[in-house]
Structure formats: C-alpha cells, structure tokens
Amino acid sequence: MREFRRTPDREHDGTATWSLTTLQRALRRAPDGLPAVSTKTILTTLWGAGYTWQQSRTWCHTGTVVRRRKAGPVTVTDRDTAPKKT
C-alpha cells in the first residue's frame, strides 16, 4: 500500500495517476516489491482496503471526495456511506 499512496513520478513511472497496470509495473520494479504480482491481486487488495475505481482513473476511499474551495482542496467524507459488501 505504500507504493499506491505515493504520488506517481511522471518521469520514473510514466504517468500522473495510477492505473492497475502502471501500479503493477511500479510494484514489480520496487526494491522491496512483488516481482510477480497480478493486476487481479492489486484490485482485490485495493477493494479490501475500501478503495473504488473512479472514472477519472484515480482511486479514492468509498464515500470520500475532494472538493475545490476558495481556500484550496478539501476532503469531504460522507458518514452515511454504506460499507462495501463483500
């Protein structure tokens, strides 16, 4: 999860946002990474941690959104969001 939480470096990772394949590539290249990790394993792990795939190609916690305000971005969490069913 540490690699996933890191903001991707455009030069090193070749992307500005994580997709499953770019995250897989980064995990396979990391010194303490997983050389044979599959995208299915990554997806299952992220779902288990409460993340969902958004159309903007970013991952975020279910029920959490970043809103733009005059003072800058604000993270808003919906307390009434139902937990993800497994």
Image (cartoon, rainbow, N blue to C red):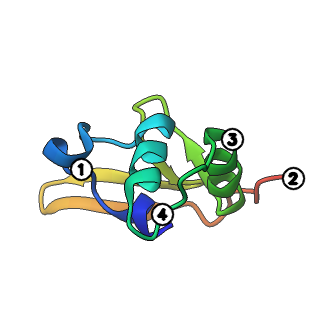
Distance between the alpha carbons at the discs numbered 2 and 4: 27 Å
Label 3: how many Cα within 10 Å (few below 14, some 14–19, many 20+): few
Residue 40 marker: 3
Q: Earlier in the sequence, mark 2 or mark 4?
A: 4
Distance between the alpha carbons at the discs numbered 1 and 3: 33 Å
Q: Is residue 57 above or below residue 11?
A: above
Of the two numbered discs 1 and 3 in the rendering, the one whose residue sits closer to the viewer: 3
Residue holding disc 1: 68
At mark 3, the secondary structure is: helix
Distance between the alpha carbons at the discs numbered 2 and 3: 16 Å
Distance between the alpha carbons at the discs numbered 1 and 2: 32 Å
- The residue shown at (15%, 59%) is 72
Residue holding disc 4: 33
Nearest to the observer: residue 64 or residue 42:
42
Of the two numbered discs 1 and 2 in the rendering, the one whose residue sits closer to the viewer: 2
At mark 1, the secondary structure is: strand
Q: Hey, what amino acid is under mark 2?
A: Thr
Distance between the alpha carbons at the discs numbered 3 and 4: 16 Å
Residue holding disc 2: 86
Of the two numbered discs 2 and 4 in the rendering, the one whose residue sits closer to the viewer: 4
Label 4: how many Cα within 10 Å (few below 14, some 14–19, many 20+): some
